[in-house]
Image: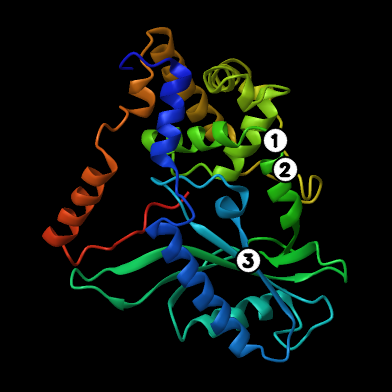
Amino acid sequence: LNNMTVQEYLKEILKQQSLPSDSDEVEALRFERNKVDGLIRESFKESSITIQYAGSYAKKTMIRDSYDLDIACYFNHDDELPGKTLEEIFNSVKESLESGYYVVPKKSAIRLQSSDINPQGIRIDFHIDVVPGRFTDDGKEEAFLYQSSRDKKRLKTNLKKHIEYIKESGLVNTIKLVKFWKKRIGLSNIKTFILELLVIESLGKLKDSNGLDECLKKFWEQLRDNIKNLKIEDPANPTGNDLSDLFDESTKTALSAFATSALTFIDNDNWESIFGKVESMSDDEKVASVGAAILLNPNRPKLWCDIT
């Protein structure tokens, strides 16, 4: 660790993975967010629409190596102009975005890709998901989302509760490190939302302030030794959103196995095998390196990293 303590090393890893509000990546996300806002409002001029950041951007858990942008788009509970049903709302929002993007419908979100195909025959994936919905009442906190895979075709959620639950957990930095661990070991099929809930559930009263190394060690110990007893629930809808299909036996087995490997590295004082080495390049060297890469390959997709 180059004479650093483990805590200092983990803070340096976090620094490497940070995405400042003035970074090119975040500026690009904001640009697309404003474009999305304009397209939707132009299509629904008579509606009162709430469009806001969600996901890792809103929760402050975004990391450089794996990030996306979730944009919630909610209509008033009594507004039927965009559609009488949630499915109609979903489809009408999708249509409003098709003038600016190539859109890919998902279970409850609309994925945005570039309208044009680059010289390599690839559409740039902006890693932006637009999630349409309708507020349940005038309080404008709880909302119904369209769910293509559910019998009732809807899911009740509360964006404010989701954001507060993560931001007020005292574990934002631990969550960011766990997201980076997930990216490095290739657990792409495990939802970040599940990992966030697992971190909070498994650590109890432990917080980032108790030491990032202590938090991570206990988290992995819980996954290794106690994963069958860990229970997670949606803080916005604990009884109405069954997460069992996202936290099934195969997921538990994989998490337990990778946690065991992480703890073996820790026992051997080998944190770098988990998170890698701290970059030694100066800021100027990093800028020069990125600039050289762009000059060498000007047609590559820029700024967009893998989805969380």
> Residue under circle 1?
169
Structural distance between the alpha carbons of marks 3 and 2: 26 Å
Viewer-proximal residue among 143 and 3: 3
Viewer-proximal residue among 78 and 279: 279
Contact, mark 2 vs mark 1 (Cβ under 8 Å) = yes
How far across and down, in percent of the image, does residue 72 sit? 64, 66
How far across and down, in percent of the image, does residue 261 sit? 41, 18
Q: Secondary structure at mark 2?
A: helix
Which numbered tag is attached to residue 165?
2
Q: Secondary structure at mark 1?
A: loop
* Position of 216 relative to 306 (above/below): above
* Position of 78 relative to 1 (above/below): below
Which numbered tag is attached to residue 255?
none
> Residue under circle 3?
148
Q: Secondary structure at mark 3?
A: loop
Tell me if residue 247 can be seen: no
Specify which label sits upstream in the sequence, 3 or 1: 3
Question: For the residue marked with disc 2, what is the amino acid?
Answer: Tyr
Name of the residue lying farthest toward the bottom: 46
Please state which of the two labelled residues, at mark 3 or mark 1, is closer to the viewer: 1
Contact, mark 3 vs mark 1 (Cβ under 8 Å) = no
Q: Dot 2: few (<14), some (14–19), or many (≥20) neighbours within 10 Å? A: some
In this figure, what is the number of numbered marks? 3
Quarter of the figure that contains the N terminus: top left
* Position of 58 relative to 82 (above/below): above
Viewed as shown, does residue 146 lie left or right of 195?
right
Question: For the residue marked with disc 1, what is the amino acid?
Answer: Ser
Q: Dot 3: few (<14), some (14–19), or many (≥20) neighbours within 10 Å? A: some
Residue at point 34%, 59% (across, down): 303
Residue at point 57%, 66% (across, down): 109
